[in-house]
Amino acid sequence: METEKGLFFVYLRERGKAIACLCLFTGIFAGTFLLYRVPWQAAAYPAALCLGLGVLLLLRDYRRFRRVHEAYRRLEQLPELTREQLPQGKSQMERDCAALLEKQLEDMARLQTASADRFTTQTDYFSAWAHQIKTPIAAMGLKLQNEDSPLARGLRGDLNRIAQYVEMAMTYLRLDAETGDYVLKTQELDPIIRGAVRRFAGEFIDRKLRLENVELRLQETGQMVLTDEKWLSFVLEQLLSNALKYTPGGEISIFWQEPDTLVIRDTGIGIAPEDLPRIFEKGFTGYNGRSDKKASGIGLYLCKRVCDRLGHGISIASAPGEGTTVFLKLGRDKIGIE
């Protein structure tokens, strides 16, 4: 913020020519009197009067200059600018500036409307596509439900992953929508966890049959949390999917850590230290993702976005060869829903 003194010097620089002209004309006025041998007292009086009047006019102009400057600085602090908030200029230059700003506001409003329309159209299209593709996925799942061959188990796992990718795409679209379907209420945490685990029951069984046993240790939490069941389920499913993907054999534990944290820990391959600071970035797959060649780099990014919207915290600790631990802080922090 500029100081009063600094602003005054800016004004003097901008009005330098006018001030120089005032001093010049005052000097000419006084000099003319002296050339005609008028006593210097008689010449100094009108010269001082003109100079004083000029200074008063400059001070009045400076006050108006400062008001306009402060008005524009206040506009900079506003989160959104409207036509009604533009300062009303008195000079032609100020009116021209206000007209230019008004035109820019109108252009920005048109661009925002067009962008919102395009986003709505894309969201509607992908939503329709996602709902349509869910039908054949569900139909194939029903056909494979009573099959217990290695091929059928593999196909069920593939279908489950396809359904996850579809859900990720829908979540990505919903997060950027202006209105989200969030239903926040206090509810039991354990049924939400069991629902997420049930989604991967087939994969746990298939791993066991392939002698790649991954043991699940699930402890009842007995906790009530303020959350949205659907969105929290999405986060848990993504975290469990990652734990299964990168734990070729070992253990996955889910337990409660006081005072307000749900912990998901695996004994998998872990995450490289240089990758940890970037794991929540969109599109970042890291060393594990590049080796696996199946990672999208979207899962953890979406988890972070959802947790921010719900007011939950998420953090990850990991070391190569020692596994990964995810901390979901489910306390009642600030809700990030707009």
Image (spheres, rainbow, N blue to C red):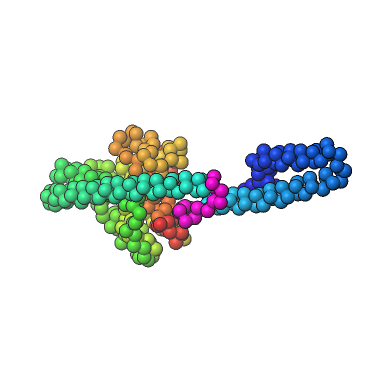
Q: How many marks?
A: 0
Q: Is residue 64 visible?
A: yes
Residue at 29%, 54% in the rendered image = 197
Q: Give residue 242's quadrant in the image.
A: top left
Residue at 87%, 43% in the rendered image = 39
Image location of residue 141, percent across then percent down? 16, 50
Extreme residue in the front direction: 36
Image location of residue 228, percent across then percent down? 35, 60
Q: Nearer the viewer, residue 320 or 157?
A: 157
Q: Nearer the viewer, residue 196 or 319?
A: 196
* Above or below: residue 226 compared with residue 246: below
Q: Give residue 269's quadrant in the image.
A: top left
Q: Nearer the viewer, residue 304 or 161?
A: 304
Q: Give residue 231's quadrant in the image.
A: bottom left
Check if residue 80 falls in the magenta segment.
yes
Left or right of 253 in this view: 136 = left
Q: Nearer the viewer, residue 114 or 206?
A: 114
Residue at 45%, 36% in the rendered image = 274
What range is drawn magenta here?
A: 79-94
Left or right of 245 in this view: 51 = right
Image location of residue 299, percent across then percent down? 34, 45
Image location of residue 134, percent across then percent down? 19, 50
Quadrant that contains the C terminus: bottom left
Residue at 39%, 36% in the rendered image = 286
Main SS of the magenta part reads loop
Check if residue 253 falls in the magenta segment.
no
Q: Is residue 3 visible?
A: no
